[in-house]
């Protein structure tokens, strides 16, 4: 099974599981009889399960039609840098988690600096002073603009 | 109507709003021009700036961003041969070859002028069609609204993607997330897991920013470390007169421009398919109708005109269902809807009754922003070309921070920031699994509209579902919804290989 077929099959499973999980949660909703607040969730849940089953059937058909073991016809041979993706998501999670405690200006400057480093192109010399400078100036500029220019409350944290 | 339009222009012609429109168009052009940045991102990022503004100023800024971003894609489509937005894909077909032939300045001039024309024609259509449609929609009740929502959902799900199953799933998934919070009519809490933050459900803006902006940023992380520097083509703007083409060429292209504008408006009105599709369809139609179809793709202005007039004409088209029915047709209009709601404006037919002057201020802002686009794009081209080279690894983290500011600014809750991350990951998952994101957003927006009107409609017809079919307008839309799904199913079945059909027969 090539990557496309695997992806289509995985999507079918995700759809089916999401539908079943949603239906399971819908069972807990209080019923008032007739068309009540649980009616639409039941309809949506059944729709999701049906679409999931249809997707699985389509993925199976695709595998049968092209024959088992034909792993050479996958067009997408793209190289994906999942390490950078995971690091980026991790940085965003840390940024959001600490935003309320450390405050917007400090946390933003730290996040920007770290994110510049993570996304920095390979094979190019990292200029820490430039990255640090841009991070601090951008964080300060955004904070001052929104806090004082547009009167938007942003968590001050340690500086508050 | 003329009085209201005059009032609208008077409201826009203040130093403050003209300033916002200028900045909005300029920022929009940058977002449209830089591949990887989108019109949705531009509107989403600038939304927090509008929180403290008057409704007229805030909405003027948003429409300016929309116009700038839709048109800005032509800059990179011609100079880099990379469409800045999907709306400019067909612009690369002839814009790129023209650039190679040393006619870059002419290509930019043609693109800019016919973008302008397409937008103006579509705004004229909006000004004439929207008030009449709104008047007709005033008589709509729950039955009609339910059916229109269902019709729009099926249309979006079936037309916006290659796979009907994925499109429908995406729309249903959006609807599912919209069921979180207090239910309409009987006010029961659903899927809140005891979290008070979830009582009001997810904020529409956090969903939009997450699905369209955060997912894009996460997606760029996949390849940004291995990308080279952007090399832009150079154009000599000093050597050209006017916009770089003759009056004869201009008038010669008018039938093509008008036809393409009509295509753009028509496709823009339909939910689910917007400028990303209209530029391609318009290009194909222009080629078929041309006396010299073999020259398309070799660097002639006909192709450029078709693409640019059509994609920009989608702006006025997409604004028609948004303003008259409160139904957004694509991601940008969905986030515009969010912008309206932030300012306490509920788009729909009543908007024309209760806030008529504001509607005409929006029309005036669209016209002023279009003129500003023409001026800025031509005279500020050198600056925009330079901005194309800003490294993404610097730009995207700053954009993420602005998204965080926008989400936090909605209700001063870190919860909303977590929400954009959640929907960002969902959006990224959609990209990886090739599920279209637009139906998700529209399911999220139209779902509650459908549910609320279903419940109200049933109450009006004593629980009888037949009321939705016997009501003429509602019945027509429900039949159209069924036809749209069946048509897609038949198309998909016909597209299956004969062997597979025989096997299943």
Image (cartoon, coloured by chain):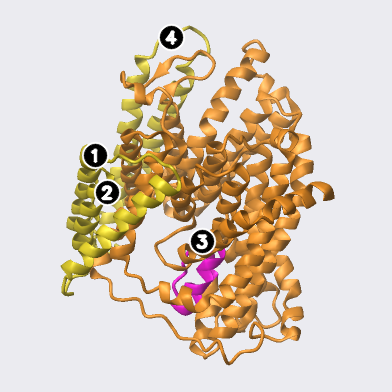
Chain colours: A yellow, B orange
Q: Which-is-in-front pick, marks 4 and 1?
A: 1
Label 2: how many Cα within 10 Å (few below 14, some 14–19, many 20+): many
> Magenta stretch: residue B334 in it?
no
Label whose residue precedes the other's in the sequence (4 or 2): 4
Chain letter belonging to callout 1: A
Q: Earlier in the sequence, mark 1 or mark 2?
A: 2
Percent x, y for residue B475?
70, 29
Question: Can you identify the residue that label 1 sits on?
Answer: A157
Q: Which residues are magenta?
A: B70-90
> Dot 4 surroundings within 10 Å: few (below 14), some, or many (20 or more)?
few
Mark 4 to mark 2 CA distance (whole Å): 48 Å
- Determine the secondary structure under disc 2: helix
**What is the C-alpha distance between the residues marked 3 and 4?**
49 Å
Tell me: residue A84, above or below residue B462. below
Q: Are marks 2 and 3 on the same chain?
A: no
Q: For mark 1, give the secondary structure.
A: helix
Chain letter of mark 3 equals B
- The residue closer to the viewer here, B108 or A62, is B108
Furthest-top residue in view?
A32
- Picture coordinates of residue A62, whole percent (x, y): 35, 50
* Mark 3 neighbour class, 10 Å CA radius: few under 14, some 14 to 19, many 20 or more: many
User: Which residue carries the number 4 mark?
Assistant: A31
């Amino acid at each position: 099974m090539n990557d496309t077929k695997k992806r289509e099959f995985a999507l079918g499973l995700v759809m089916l599981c999401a539908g079943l999980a949603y239906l399971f949660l819908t069972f807990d909703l209080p019923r008032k009889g007739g068309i009540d607040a649980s009616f639409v969730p039941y309809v949506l849940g059944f729709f999701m399960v049906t679409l999931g089953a249809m997707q699985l059937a389509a993925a199976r058909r695709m595998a049968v039609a092209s024959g088992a073991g034909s792993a050479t016809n996958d067009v997408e041979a793209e190289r994906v840098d999942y390490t950078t993706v995971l690091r980026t998501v991790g940085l965003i999670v840390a940024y959001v988690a600490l935003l309320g405690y450390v405050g917007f200006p400090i946390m933003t400057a730290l996040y920007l600096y770290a994110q510049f480093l993570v996304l920095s192109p390979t094979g190019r010399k990292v200029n820490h002073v430039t990255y640090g400078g841009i991070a601090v100036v951008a964080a300060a500029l955004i904070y001052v603009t929104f806090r004082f220019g547009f009167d938007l409350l942003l968590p001050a944290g340690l500086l508050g | 109507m003329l009085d209201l339009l005059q009032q609208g222009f008077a409201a826009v012609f203040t130093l403050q709003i003209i300033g916002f429109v200028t900045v909005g168009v300029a920022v929009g052009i940058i977002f449209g021009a830089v591949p990887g940045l989108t019109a949705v991102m531009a509107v989403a990022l600038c939304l927090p700036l509008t929180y403290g503004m008057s409704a007229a100023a805030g909405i003027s800024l948003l429409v300016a961003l929309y116009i700038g971003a839709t048109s800005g894609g032509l800059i990179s489509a011609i100079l880099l041969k990379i469409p800045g937005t999907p709306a400019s894909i067909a612009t690369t077909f002839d814009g790129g070859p023209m650039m190679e032939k040393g006619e870059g300045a002419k290509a930019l001039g043609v693109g800019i002028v016919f973008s302008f024309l397409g937008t103006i024609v579509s705004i004229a259509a909006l000004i004439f069609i929207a008030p009449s449609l709104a008047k007709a929609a005033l008589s709509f009740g729950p039955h009609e609204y339910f059916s229109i929502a269902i019709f729009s959902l099926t249309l979006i799900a079936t037309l916006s993607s290659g796979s009907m199953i994925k499109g429908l799933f995406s729309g249903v998934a959006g609807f599912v997330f919209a069921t979180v919070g207090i239910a309409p009519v009987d006010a029961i809490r659903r899927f809140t897991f005891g979290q008070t933050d979830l009582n009001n459900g997810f904020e529409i803006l956090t969903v939009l920013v997450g699905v369209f902006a955060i997912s894009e940023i996460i997606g760029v992380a996949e390849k940004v470390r291995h990308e080279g520097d952007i090399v832009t083509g150079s154009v000599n703007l000093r050597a050209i007169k006017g916009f770089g083409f003759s009056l004869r060429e201009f008038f010669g292209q008018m039938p093509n421009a008008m036809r393409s504008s009509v295509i753009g408006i028509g496709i823009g009105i339909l939910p689910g398919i917007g400028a990303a599709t209209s530029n391609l369809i318009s290009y194909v139609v222009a080629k078929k109708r041309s006396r010299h179809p073999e020259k398309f793709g070799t660097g002639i202005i006909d192709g450029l005109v078709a693409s640019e007039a059509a994609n920009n004409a989608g702006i006025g088209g997409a604004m028609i269902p948004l303003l008259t029915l409160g139904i957004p047709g694509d991601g940008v209009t969905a986030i515009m809807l969010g912008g309206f709601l932030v300012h306490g404006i509920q788009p729909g037919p009543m908007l024309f009754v209760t806030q008529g002057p504001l509607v005409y201020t929006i029309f005036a802002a669209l016209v002023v922003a279009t003129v500003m686009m023409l001026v800025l794009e031509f005279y500020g081209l050198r600056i925009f070309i330079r901005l194309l080279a800003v490294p993404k690894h610097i730009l995207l983290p700053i954009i993420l921070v602005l998204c965080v500011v926008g989400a936090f600014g909605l209700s001063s809750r870190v919860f909303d920031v977590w929400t954009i991350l959640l929907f960002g990951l969902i959006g990224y998952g959609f990209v990886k699994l090739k599920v279209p994101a637009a139906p998700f957003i529209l399911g999220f927006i139209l779902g509650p509209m459908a549910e609320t009107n279903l419940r109200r409609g049933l109450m009006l017809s004593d629980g009888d579902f037949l009321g939705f079919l016997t009501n003429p307008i509602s019945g027509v839309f429900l039949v159209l919804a069924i036809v749209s799904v069946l048509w897609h199913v038949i198309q998909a079945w016909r597209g299956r290989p004969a062997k597979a059909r025989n096997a299943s027969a």
